[in-house]
Amino acid sequence: MAIIKNVKVYKENELINATVITEGNLIAEVFPSSKIIPEKYSTEQIFDGNGQLLIPGMIDVHIHGAKNYDMMDGSTESIQAVSMACAETGCTSFLVTSVSSSLEDLIQMIRQTKKVVGKEQGAKIAGIHLEGPYLNIEKKGMQNPAYLRHPDLKEMKQIFDEADGLIKMVTIAPELPGGIELIDFLKKRGVVIAIAHSNATYEEAQDAFAKGATHITHCFNAMPAIHHRAPGLVTAALENDAVSVQTIVDGVHLHPGIVRLIHKIKGPDKIVLTTDALQAMGVGDGEYIFGGHQVTVKEGIARLQDGTLASSTVTMNKSLRLSNEFGISLQDSIQMATSTPAEILGMKKFGLIEKGYIADLVLLDEKFEVLTTWINGEKY
């Protein structure tokens, strides 16, 4: 049990001073600080939040690595390192995310992930996000062209059979031969079908949405720019109310004006803050090998030798801070990092500080630095 008093939380669209009580892995009570803590809890140890902000644990639907560890390297150690790095930066659940690779390397990553699930040393694994390999070479970004290929339902079935239900999101380029058939395959398996690294036209994108795609990975990045006579994938996504989008809010991938525009069109219930972080997250500038490429990180920006952006080094707490600094309200920014990804992934009872919800909580200071993280009601 945890009694967390003297914290600011959002309750019914208002930021209030509150006390939060957890029992087991659930939130038992949330009430104003002015209310006396019930007698039945009088013997419990009290944690004083000193008036700081308490938010639900953040959920990262797209992360590749952290602390010098790449989750595609085929080891449980790397996955655990990312789990701990996430917890330290306010993220309590994440999707282990692949890059385009050989089938053998992907299967190895899936097998190592299965070994870690339920034994995480930090943030919880909410599933796997397959970013590729069925992506368009014309919009490859940092994806290694040696591994990009057209959709192969036989191969994908083998991947799903190996994953035992862990795959929650798949990013594809629907305009590739077999793309629509792949959407049908994925829809039947109940995963989030995302689009990126795609050169889809407006019409091709709308067809993909009609068939079952519902999400855009790193919106605006690795896809055609908007043109008034060729509106493309981004316009189709922004126009379609059923489609949600990921945003890498790091001050590099998206201009603040674009972040505000996406928010104005989509609202906080259709935008997800994500890191898309590589192993340089939490380490800093230097040289890295990522996705088979040499990547240089300078001033926190990761690029290939030709200047192409290669994932990011941002953390979820920094993304939250930047979203707010860019003009998105604090409440909306928090929603974009918590309840919106929970809803998209079908994670019931996650993403809110409400009675009966999972007690994944994060205490932040005024600079959005993480002071304390609770996972399943336990202090990390």
Image (tube, rainbow, N blue to C red):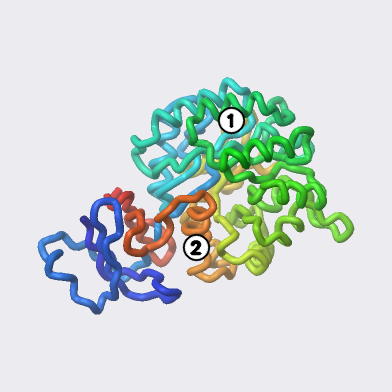
Does residue 266 lie above or below 279 as drawn? below
Query: Left of 318 or right of it: where is 57?
Result: left
Does residue 198 lie above or below 245 as drawn? above
Query: Left of 329 or right of it: where is 29?
Result: left
- Image spot of residue 34 (x, y percent): 24, 79
Task: Tell me which residue sits at (40%, 74%) in the image.
Answer: 15
Please tell me whether mark 1 sits on a helix, a strand or a loop.
strand
Q: Which mark is residue 46?
A: none
Q: Residue furthest top?
A: 104
- Image spot of residue 110 (x, y percent): 50, 29
Circle 1 is placed at which residue position? 289
Sequence-first tag of 1 and 2: 1
Q: Residue furthest front?
A: 188
Does residue 316 lie above or below 149 as drawn? below
Circle 2 is placed at which residue position? 335
| Front-lying residue, 146 or 24 | 24
Does residue 150 lie above or below 52 as drawn? above
